[in-house]
Amino acid sequence: MDTFQSQIEEFSNYIQNERRLSPHTLTAYQTDLRQFQYFLEETLRLKSFTEGTYNEIRMWIIHLKENEISNRSINRKISTLKSLFKYFITKQKVKVNPMLKIIAPKQSKKLPVYFDQKLLNNLFNSEVFTNDFMGIRDILIMELLYGTGMRLAELINIKQTDIDNLEIKVLGKGNKERIIPITKNIASFISLYNEKRKEEFTTKNNHYLLLTNKGDKLYEKFVYRVVNHYLGLVTNEKKRSPHTMRHSFATNMLNNGAQLHTIKEILGHANLSATQVYTHNTIERLRDAYKKFHPKEN
């Protein structure tokens, strides 16, 4: 009989090697499954995920609600279990999918945090970025995130061979490749960065574009620190992450008149509904302008 641990390992291998989900998503899935495992073991004395039925899953959701876990977090855990039991069905480990009857709790939609164009332009036009390898690399990180809307995982996996004139090839979710256009300004920064990189690491040959101070491939926490540091110089907003740069790109593109379908393709969204969240920020902006400038409001 499969154990919790063997099932988690088997499922992890599947989502990592076949579905090719990001390391961040893999860690989130594993965390959710271990929490569900603890509940099944300690509360219900079960020994395998496949013993879990609709009733046991519903009891766990109630348990999470009683412990004041947010609907957003609960829905993520439900999504994890949906993926798990869908996998069990394909492998014929269970005959009935208990997740088909599970209804996710409603959650309030939070608008994506973004930074307006003027604030980011002030940052890029300031003199906070040094002219050495590290400074040029840091501004290139910020320029790529804001100038293309690419994801963090896509950024750190860019190879030198992925850049062709004014285009960058990235590997997105589900192992899907897409081409993102870049500005001449970003292309100039890439050229300058490569010059500094050759001076900094004369003997080191790394095929990834962006490197750490020691000449190794970038990693997620490194990029988080860079983004958090530079955004902290121009804003007190707590959410200062690579993803807020992605939100900023999409929202400001929309505010400047870009078509939603165009933004969808650049961001690599699977469907338009994922991109439409940015229209809410635009509507809020229009509403504020309406209140501020409408003659009846003054």
Image (cartoon, rainbow, N blue to C red):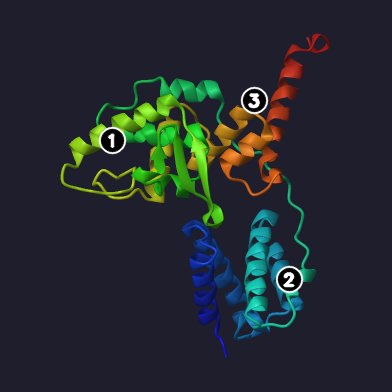
Q: What is the x, y in percent for residue 80?
A: 62, 65
Q: Residues within 10 Å of mark 3 (few under 14, many from 20)?
A: some
Q: Disc number at residue 259?
A: none
Image quarter for residue 250? top right
Q: Residues within 10 Å of mark 2 (few under 14, many from 20)?
A: some
**In-image side of 251 versus 13 (left or right):** right
Q: Earlier in the sequence, mark 1 or mark 3?
A: 1
Task: Name the mark nearer the viewer: 1 or 3.
Answer: 1
Image quarter for residue 137? top left
Q: What is the x, y in percent for residue 249?
A: 55, 32
Q: Earlier in the sequence, mark 1 or mark 2?
A: 2
The amino acid type of the residue labelled 1 equals: Asn
Q: What is the x, y in percent for residue 194?
A: 28, 35
Against 146, residue 204 (above or below) is below
The residue that label 3 is drawn on is 255
The residue lying at 67 percent from left, 45 percent from top is 274
The residue that label 2 is drawn on is 99
Farthest-out residue, front: 164
The residue lying at 63 percent from left, 85 percent from top is 46
Q: Disc number at residue 194?
A: 1
Visible residue check, residue 187: yes
- Number of marks in the rendered image: 3
The amino acid type of the residue labelled 3 equals: Asn
Q: Regarding mark 3 in the picture, which secondary structure is present there?
A: helix
Q: Residues within 10 Å of mark 1 (few under 14, many from 20)?
A: some
Q: Quadrant of the C terminus?
A: top right
Q: Regarding mark 1 in the picture, which secondary structure is present there?
A: helix
